Each structure stands twice: as C-alpha cells, then as structure tokens.
Image: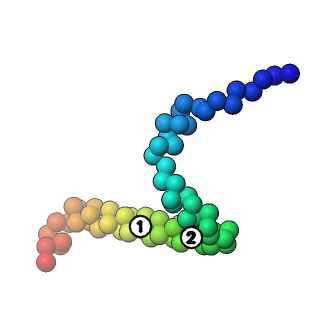
Amino acid sequence: MMEIDMSPDPVIEVYKKDVDDTLLRENLKLTPEQRVRNLMALQEFIEEVQRAGRQARRQARAAAEHPAESVA
C-alpha cells in the first residue's frame, strides 16, 4: 500500500501567512445565496470599472488625436 505524506506543504504554508482568516470566517457566516449575491455584485462592479476604463482610454485617444478640440 502506498503511504501518503501528510506533512504541510511548505509552499502553502508560506502563502497562508498572508491570508486574512477574518474575511474567510465572515464570508462563511453567510448563506450560499448571500455569497452568490456578493459575487454577482462584485462582478457588476468589475464590469463597470472596465467600462469606465475603456471610456477613459477612448477619450484620451480622441484628445490626443484632436488636441485643439479638447481645450475648453
């Protein structure tokens, strides 16, 4: 029979020190539905930030292409 090494993985141990246990515990207090809703809200926020970034880049390109028009 093959023996399985149950000692902690040193790589995982290094990353664990940077994990905020309180956030994990607070999230686990939520119902699965609440967690999904939070995830959906986060996704909507990310999409809005991406839209704003695209718009800002378009405006910056337009201003660079037509500098006289962007002076108010």
Up-down relation of residue 70 to residue 65 (above or below): below
Q: How many marks?
A: 2
Q: Earlier in the sequence, mark 1 or mark 2?
A: 2
Residue count near mark 1 (Cα–Cα under 10 Å), binned few <14, some 14–19, many ≥20? few
The residue depicted at 41 percent of the width and 67 percent of the height is: 49
Identified by mark 2, the residue type is Asn
Compared across the picture, whether 2 is left or right of 51 comes to: right
- Amino acid type, residue under disc 1 in the picture: Val
Residue visible at 47% across and 65% down in the picture: 46
Secondary structure category for the residue under label 1: helix
The answer to whether residue 58 is visible is no
Q: Nearer the viewer, residue 19 or 63?
A: 19
Quadrant of image for the C terminus: bottom left
Question: Would residue 15 appear left or right of 69 to someone viewing this image?
Answer: right
Q: Which residue is mark 1?
A: 49
Residue 13 % position (x, y): 53, 37
Q: Which residue is mark 2?
A: 38
